[in-house]
């Protein structure tokens, strides 16, 4: 997330500003926006696999019969986190990243 906040998102904001003619597009040190997008997509894949393993180890967040309230809260929060993460990944991979690539392609000769 640090890379997204310090590298990718500021560049995407710059792309949008350039598209709207409010500022010129500065050359990126990483070449094309595809490079940080590739990194983010690999990280998304890794995080997805990690959460899949947590879900598997927890038997789909199935509480043991003797689970206390804290245990129940933990599993509920893990499930909510996983749902939020899937939405986050979907929005980036399927909406934000393709749009950024499209804008960059239009701006660069």
Image: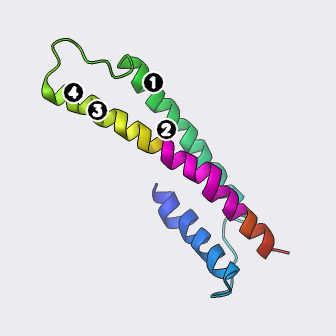
Q: What label does residue 47 carry, if any?
A: 2
Percent across and percent down for residue 3 are 51, 58
Q: What label does residue 35 carry, if any?
A: none
In this rendering, the label closer to the viewer, 4 or 1: 4
For label 3, the SS is helix
Q: Earlier in the sequence, mark 4 or mark 1?
A: 1
Q: Residues within 10 Å of mark 3 (few under 14, many from 20)?
A: some
For label 1, the SS is helix
For label 4, the SS is helix
Percent across and percent down for residue 27 are 70, 76
Q: Which residue is mark 3?
A: 76
In the image, residue 90 lies in the stretch drawn in magenta = yes
Whether residues under marks 1 and 3 lie with C-beta atoms below 8 angstroms apart, the answer is no
Rendered residue at 67%/64% (across/down): 100
Q: Earlier in the sequence, mark 3 or mark 2?
A: 2
In this rendering, the label closer to the viewer, 1 or 3: 3
Q: Which residue is mark 1?
A: 53
Q: Earlier in the sequence, mark 2 or mark 4?
A: 2
Q: Which residues are magenta?
A: 86-101
Whether residues under marks 3 and 2 lie with C-beta atoms below 8 angstroms apart, the answer is no
Percent across and percent down for residue 77 are 29, 37
In the image, residue 5 lies in the stretch drawn in magenta = no
Rendered residue at 68%/62% (across/down): 99
Q: Quadrant of residue 21?
A: bottom right
Distance CA(mark 3)–CA(mark 2): 18 Å
Q: Which residue is mark 4?
A: 72
């Amino acid at each position: 997330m640090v890379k997204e906040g310090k590298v990718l998102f500021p560049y995407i904001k710059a792309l949008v500003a350039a598209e709207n003619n409010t500022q010129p597009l500065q050359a990126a040190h990483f070449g094309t926006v595809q490079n940080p997008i590739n990194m983010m997509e690999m990280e998304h894949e890794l995080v997805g696999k990690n959460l899949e393993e947590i879900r598997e180890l927890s038997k789909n967040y199935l509480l043991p019969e003797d689970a206390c309230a804290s245990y129940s809260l933990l599993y509920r929060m893990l499930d909510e986190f996983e749902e939020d993460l899937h939405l986050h990944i979907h929005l980036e991979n399927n909406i934000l990243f393709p749009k950024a690539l499209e804008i960059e392609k239009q701006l660069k000769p």
